[in-house]
Image (cartoon, helix red, strand yellow):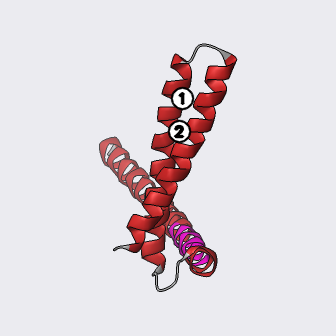
Amino acid sequence: MSKKIAEGVTEGFKKIEDGVVGGYKKIEDGVVSGYKKIEDGVVEGFSKMTDKFVDKFLTHEGESVEDAKKRLENEQAAREAAGKEAVKKQAGAGTGTDIGRASVEASREIAKASVEASKNAGKH
C-alpha cells in the first residue's frame, strides 16, 4: 500500500515538474520572440536611416546606394592602408624634421589613395 502511495506522489511531482518546466519554456519563448522582433525592428530602422543618409549626402551622380557604400568602404580601406604605411615610415625616421616630412608625405599618400579609390569606384 505504501508503495502505491509513493508511486502516486512521485507521479504527481513529475506532472507538477512537467507543468512548471512547460510554463517556463513558454515564458522563455515569448521573451526570446519579443526580443527578436525588437532587434529586427531596430536593425531594419538603422539600415533604412543609413541608406537615406548615404543616398542624400554621399552618392555621386548616377550611383546607387549600394555602389556608394562599396566605394566608401574601399576608400576607407585605402586610407587605413596608407595610414599604416605612414606609421611604418615615421617609425624609421630619425629627427623631428624627418618625422615632419614623413607625416606630410603620408598625408599626401592618403589623399592620393582616397582620390584613386574614388575614381576607380566611378568606373564600375
* Count of numbered circles in the view: 2
Q: How packed is label 2: few (under 14 Cα within 10 Å), some, or many (20 or more)?
A: some
Query: Relative to 90, does residue 24 appear above or below in the rendering?
Result: below
Picture quarter containing residue 102? top right
Residue at image location 43% in from the left, 75% down from the top: 66
Q: Secondary structure at mark 1?
A: helix
Q: Mark 2 = which residue?
A: 83
Q: Residue at x 55, y 64 (%)?
A: 31
Q: Quadrant of residue 93?
A: top right
Point out which mark residue 73 bears: none
Residue at image coords 48%, 78%: 65
- Cα separation, mark 2 vs mark 1, equals 6 Å
Q: Nearer the viewer, residue 112 or 88?
A: 112
> Looking at the image, which residue sits at the far bottom?
62
Please provide percent x and percent y for residue 34: 55, 70
Q: Amino acid at mark 1?
A: Val
In magenta segment, residue 45: yes
Point 52% across, 84% down: residue: 61
Find residue 18 and report its horizontal and vertical position in percent.
Answer: 40, 57
Circle 1 residue? 87
Label 2 close to label 1 by CB (< 8 Å): yes
Task: Name the quadrant of the C terminus.
Answer: bottom left
Amino acid type, label 2:
Gly
Can residue 19 be seen? no
Range of the magenta residues?
36-50
**Closer to the camera, 105 or 9?**
105
40 is within the stretch colored magenta: yes
Secondary element at tag 2: helix
* Residues packed near mark 1 inside 10 Å, few (<14), some (14 to 19) or many (20 plus): some
Q: Tell me if residue 81 comes above or below residue 56 in the rendering.
A: above
Q: Is residue 77 above or below residue 97?
A: below
